[in-house]
Amino acid sequence: MSDLSAVYQEMLAFFKPLWPGEDKPLVLGEGKADSPILMLIGEAPGETEVIKGRPFVGKAGKNLDEFLQLAGLKREEIFVSNVVKIRPTEKGPTGRTRNRAPNKEELSLFTPFLLKEIEAVAPRALVTLGNVPLKALTEGKITVGDCHGAWMNSRAGIPLFSLYHPASIIYRRALAPVYENDVMELARCLKEQAIPG
Ligand code: URA
């Protein structure tokens, strides 16, 4: 059994009894699990991801495809995952179930497993999408507005490049060129083998 399947087995065993009576399936990471050039880390799966049991499909998958195209990468060359592996939900005003940001409990339960997952996958570099994975992987109070488009150290001991979450661009159109520039800078670093560390 690879390290990664051992980590996932441990996660499944840990989370199965945690929320009795609630249907909270785990959406695990996927892709090149053996020392890929990049591991891309999002926040948490959404509705489509849970239905398909795969990260970054549905709307987020379209964002991922755009990222890959800009960065000159193929999905099978990288590993994609999320900090929180369940879909965090709440009831909206009309009673419909909708996504919400992961809460403190979810983040503290899932972050140690994310660190084990990163260790097992052993990517050359980490790319975080938005504040949730950035905060999980850095000690300080740094936000993506402070450090997007640049390399920094991570708690996992692997260089980290932070990007805005592509979904945030839908609400803040002015971020679209910023995000594109950041991805182009990442592409340049990959091409010129200029990843620090
Ligand atoms: N879907 C994911 O898998 N991750 C995100 O961060 C957003 C949508």
Image: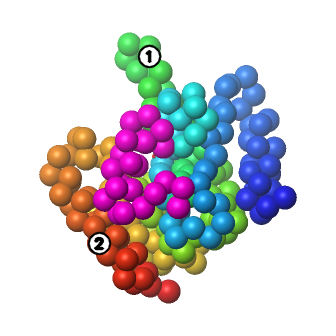
Instruction: Decide whether the magenta segment is chiefly helix, strand or loop.
Output: helix
Residue depicted at x 62% and y 70% = 35
According to the picture, the residue beneath numbered tag 1 turns out to be 96
In the displayed structure, does residue 19 sit left or right of residue 127? right
What residue range appears in magenta? 56-77
Binning the other alpha carbons within 10 Å of mark 2 as few (below 14), some (14 to 19) or many (20 upward) gives some
**Horizontal and vertical percent for residue 116?**
69, 63
Which residue of the protein is positioned furthest toward the right in this rendering? 1
According to the picture, the residue beneath numbered tag 2 turns out to be 185
Residue depicted at x 34% and y 70% = 187
**Horizontal and vertical percent for residue 36?**
57, 67
Tell me: residue 126, above or below residue 107.
below
Q: Which amino acid does label 2 sit on?
A: Glu
Q: Which amino acid does label 1 sit on?
A: Arg
Residue at mark 1 to residue at mark 2: CA–CA distance: 40 Å
**Quadrant location, the N terminus:** bottom right
**Horizontal and vertical percent for residue 5?**
77, 54
Along the line of sight, which residue is nearer the eye, 123 or 129? 123
SS class, disc 2: helix
**Horizontal and vertical percent for residue 18?**
74, 37
